[in-house]
Amino acid sequence: MPGIPSFISHANHRRHALIHMAAVFRSWARSGFTEGQSGHISVRDPEFPTLMWMNPLGRHFGSLTAGDMLLLEVDSGRIVAGNANPTTGKRTANAAGYYIHSAIHRSRHDVGAVCHAHTISGRAWSVFARPLDMLTQDVCNFYNAHAVYANYGGIVFGNREGERIAEVLGTTNKGVILMNHGLLTVGVSVDEAGFLFGLLDRSCAIQLQVEAACSSGTLEKQIISDEEAAYNYAMASEKHVLYREAQPDIELELELAGGENCLAAGLDSLIVKPL
């Protein structure tokens, strides 16, 4: 089945990425990943890699369109493009989100998108500061590819905390469990990062259920062997495969929104140019 598409121009690539970014947010809303103003996705601009798109602070995931996204300079956090919030009349980015995402985009040039939110299962499992066991075929997408950040530093309002998270993510991991905080995933595309985020959250939920079932001591976990987990990872964790995995949810959000043009609302008014 088709994987990541090719594009005739940076503008077409940008349009595709931002529409799919909005669709991932709407899917998150449907999945119950909202928690006030917490949670953010960033997408590296396909034409200007020193810039990244992020969702505005305070807008509900379920109402976002491509035209709501803000374009930030990775190194400074300066907003260089984006429409004003219709409620406040201002362009406001999430400072904590900027510190986390910018550090990852600076350290991982292979990463096109970063996802972070405070989910129920993710936060619950995070308190144990443990990686996930390879309990199911699906979680093998994170075999030797996820880490635990076990140094909770409070709400991220400084460069250093974001840099520590990026250091724990490392050069090859696809996800991080942030102790007492939540989950974070990365991908070549926002589709990949978004799919992996949902998978990581569901895997935390499964692990919690399995641990509860084993608490009496009468049941024993059967963990997938390293050899089988490595095979599953090799088969299922390639960027085109993970892009394809995301498409059913993306396509549902496009249909529910009334089509691609509806999720593109406001995009044509964005002016993107080099600094």
Image (cartoon, helix red, strand yellow):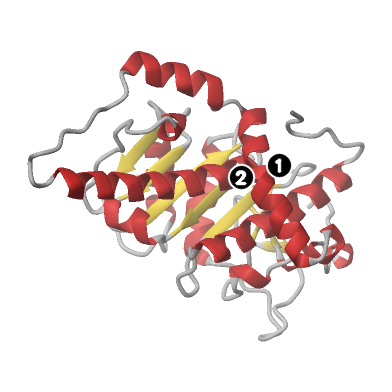
Q: Residue furthest right?
A: 8
Indicate which disc residue 49 carries: 1
- Residue sitting nearer the eye, 150 or 118: 118
Which one is in front in this view, the residue at disc 1 or the one at disc 2?
2
Q: Is residue 174 above or below residue 182?
A: above
Can residue 150 be seen in this snapshot?
Answer: no
**Residue occupying image coordinates x 83% and y 66%:** 262
Q: Which residue is mark 2?
A: 113
Amino acid type at circle 1 is Pro
- Residue sitting nearer the eye, 260 or 110: 260
Q: Residue furthest front?
A: 218
- Residue sitting nearer the eye, 14 or 49: 14
Which of the 4 image quarters holds residue 26? bottom right
Left or right: where 136 falls relative to 237: left
Left or right: where 21 falls relative to 222: right
Position of the N terminus, as image quadrant, is: top right
Q: Residue furthest left?
A: 217
What secondary structure is found at the residue carrying circle 1?
A: loop
Residue 260 drawn at (x, y percent): 83, 58
Q: Give the Cα separation between the discs numbered 1 and 2.
A: 11 Å
Amino acid type at circle 2 is Ala
Residue 177 drawn at (x, y percent): 35, 46
Which of the 4 image quarters holds residue 266? bottom right
Can residue 70 be seen in this snapshot?
Answer: yes
